[in-house]
Amino acid sequence: MMKERILQIGKTGEESLPAITTMAGLQAWEVEYLGRKSELNTLLKSLRDLSPEEKKIVGPLGNSTKQKLIALFDTKKKKLLENSIDWQAEGVDITAPGAKVAIGHLNPLTQIEHEIQDIFTSMGFVVADGPEVETEHYNFDALNFPKDHPSRDMQDTFWIKPDKKAKERYLPRTHTSGVQVRYMEAHKPPLRIIVPGKVFRNEATDASHEHTFHQFECLMVDVEGQVTVATFKYVAETFFSAFFGEKVTVRLRPSFFPFTEPSFEFDISCIICGAHGCATCKHSGWLEIGGAGMVNQRVFEAAGYKRGQYQGFAWGFGMARLAMMKYKIADIRLLMSGDLRFIRQF
Ligand code: FA5
């Protein structure tokens, strides 16, 4: 009899909960089913008058029913609380999209630098570094630029005001090629390096020229016969194809640099139009990329190697060019402008 009644209380308590929609209603429910004077509580109190056998059956049932009703009450209370906040009165628009957290990110030039490093290190190249303020020796002399020869003006140099006591003249480096000699002085072939870095030239700026820009040098040297123009072409085509994610071919044109012999300007097939001809490649199907050549034996000598012992190629070109092609940027000056409207697009 008592057992049936307890089961009945548990059932009606549970069944009456869903209809409750207010906190007041829930409080009334709590008084009725869990309160001190509730029927369930009264029944539980009267347990002590039962025989031990009856107690064994009814006691656990009474307790578990009570626990079940407490749990149901807690869940319902939580639900009602969640729904009871008047968001409008609180001035909160719960339909508004969440505020985006602004996270910093890398300049496209830095992103390009990392990509270049990834591709070259996967081909066994090492990333080397050199000082941005360079001596005349490494920037020019060791690279076979004749003294007081106009070729030294090929790269418009900012000279640092000379210190009368200093033996050397200093300059913000005009190219990354000086690191070739620094590295070779410290390492013996076979060697493969790339040198990404900032360079400086006293130039008027326009959409494709900056006074401060990034170059990256590539140098590969081994014993005579191991590194040829064909090796250079292969490495260049492998790199550009990986960088642009499509097959790129390289074309060499004769040129002059004091530190390479023979020297080339090199072009890549236009990745904008697939070499069919477009405004970017001036309808030639080719894009100018940078300078290159086989390392002049005089440069090896300046680094302390014996003449005729080694052979290698070197190239150097502007990284902004690559960033501009990859991201379709029309003006090089945007890259270092610090303009957040520009930079936030990457
Ligand atoms: C050199 O600087 C040579 N050191 C390259 C080299 C290295 C040749 C190794 C052979 C062997 P050049 O002055 O052409 O060469 O510059 C190389 C590249 O730098 C150019 O092709 C261009 O992409 C970039 N560049 C040159 N001047 C500027 C500038 N003012 N603004 C932006 N990019 C520039």
Image: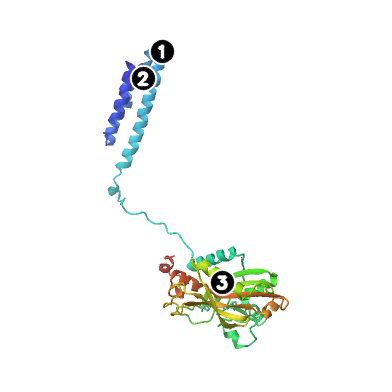
Toward the viewer: 11 or 100? 11
Give whichever of 173, 46 is nearer the camera: 173
From the top left corner, tell me how far across and down residue 62 is, in percent.
37, 21
Q: Horizontally, is 261 left or right of 40 in the view?
A: right
Q: Which mark is residue 258?
A: none
Q: Earlier in the sequence, mark 1 or mark 2?
A: 2
Quarter of the image with the N terminus in it = top left
Report the residue marked by disc 1.
53
- 193 to 28, vertically: above or below: below
Q: Pointer 3: what residue?
A: 236
Foreground: disc 1 or disc 2: 1
Q: Is mark 1 within 8 Å of ligand 1?
A: no
Q: Position of residue 187 (x, y in %)?
A: 69, 69
The residue singled out by tag 2 in the image is 44
Distance between the alpha carbons at the discs numbered 1 and 2 = 15 Å
Mark 2 or mark 3, earlier in chain: 2
The front one of 134 and 184 is 184
